[in-house]
Amino acid sequence: MTKKFSLLQIILYVFLTVFSVIIISPLVIVLSSSLRTPENMKNPLILFNELSFKSYEIAFQKMNFENAFLTSIITTVGSVLVIILIASMVAYPISRIKSKISNFLYYFFIAGLIVPSQMVVVPIAQQFGRLNIPSNRFTPMIMFITCSLPFSVFLYAGFMKSVPIELEEAAYIDGASIWTRFIRIVFPLLQPASVAVAITQGMWIWNDYFYPMIFVSERQQYSLPVAMLQFLGDKENPAQWNILFAACVLTAIPVIIIFALLQKQFINGITVGAVKG
């Protein structure tokens, strides 16, 4: 039996097709240009007219990819683990204790979503200097953790309302302390919220170049996004576009691999963040 499509469905499919082509086209151009030699500066719209990995070799060496990749892993994983731990612990009493103090703390963290952290980066950098905090790969983690807490607490506090309090009451009758109740009963049930926090904040931390560029002084400790910026060039040294595109692909490959392996968790986490947040 032939399926008939209405005019509205046909228009919708055409629109989605055109929209998909517009979104994918820049990615195809980047991939095509990255597979050229640095000297090949022909029209980038002429796709895949050359197949060479020379730009990747140069980008890999100049980025110091091994150190930059290690820095990005340490920064992202370390920050996300601390964010999950602190945000869940903060959201637990806020959502369970009904008092004016808990309400104040909830709105206090919500207020952190309003103020952009870039507005206060100058006084924070000055304060870091007064406290003699070293400018290394771990320094941006302070900013990542601090800036991620408002959203993460907001997400955990909203999701924790769906955790039955009767489970905690039963454990309390059996003599479980508040720490035991949180670690063994509440926190495992917060796994969907933890995945949502890990996805949203982890992607931002991995792709961010602003804080590493501000707070890291040694080139050997740059993260991948900052190491990639050196190919932009300036007035005296024009941008090496093919090498820059190769660096972009190298930076995106780890995220693409993780998404391919954990696609289901990504989708579930984003859904939880959208519904519960």
Image (tube, rainbow, N blue to C red):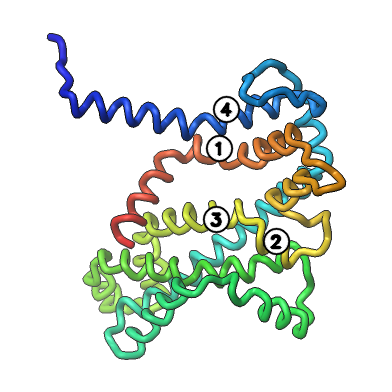
| Closer to viewer: mark 4 or mark 1 | 4
Which residue is at the far top?
1
> Residues under labels 2 and 3: Cα distance?
13 Å
Give the residue displayed 76% in from the left and 31% down from the top: 56
Q: What's the mark number on residue 206?
A: none
| Mark toward the start of the polypeptide (2 vs 1) | 2
Mark 4 lies on a secondary structure that is helix
> Residues under labels 4 and 1: Cα distance?
15 Å
Q: What's the mark number on residue 204?
A: 3
Give the residue displayed 78% in from the left and 69% down from the top: 135
Task: Please say if the residues under marks 2 and 3 sit with CB atoms less than 8 Å apart.
Answer: no
For the N terminus, the image quarter is top left
| Mark toward the start of the polypeptide (4 vs 1) | 4
Please rate how many residues cluster around mark 1, counting C-alpha atoms within 10 Å: few if below 14, some from 14 to 19, many from 20.
Answer: few
Residue type at the position of mark 2: Pro
Q: Is residue 214 above or below residue 94?
A: above
Residue type at the position of mark 3: Trp
Disc 1 marks which residue? 256
Give the residue displayed 72% in from the left and 53% down from the top: 226
Disc 2 marks which residue? 212
Mark 2 lies on a secondary structure that is helix
| Mark toward the start of the polypeptide (2 vs 3) | 3
The answer to whether residue 260 is left or right of residue 46 is left
Disc 4 marks which residue? 28
> Residues under labels 4 and 3: Cα distance?
23 Å
Task: Please say if the residues under marks 2 and 1 sit with CB atoms less than 8 Å apart.
Answer: no
For the C terminus, the image quarter is bottom left
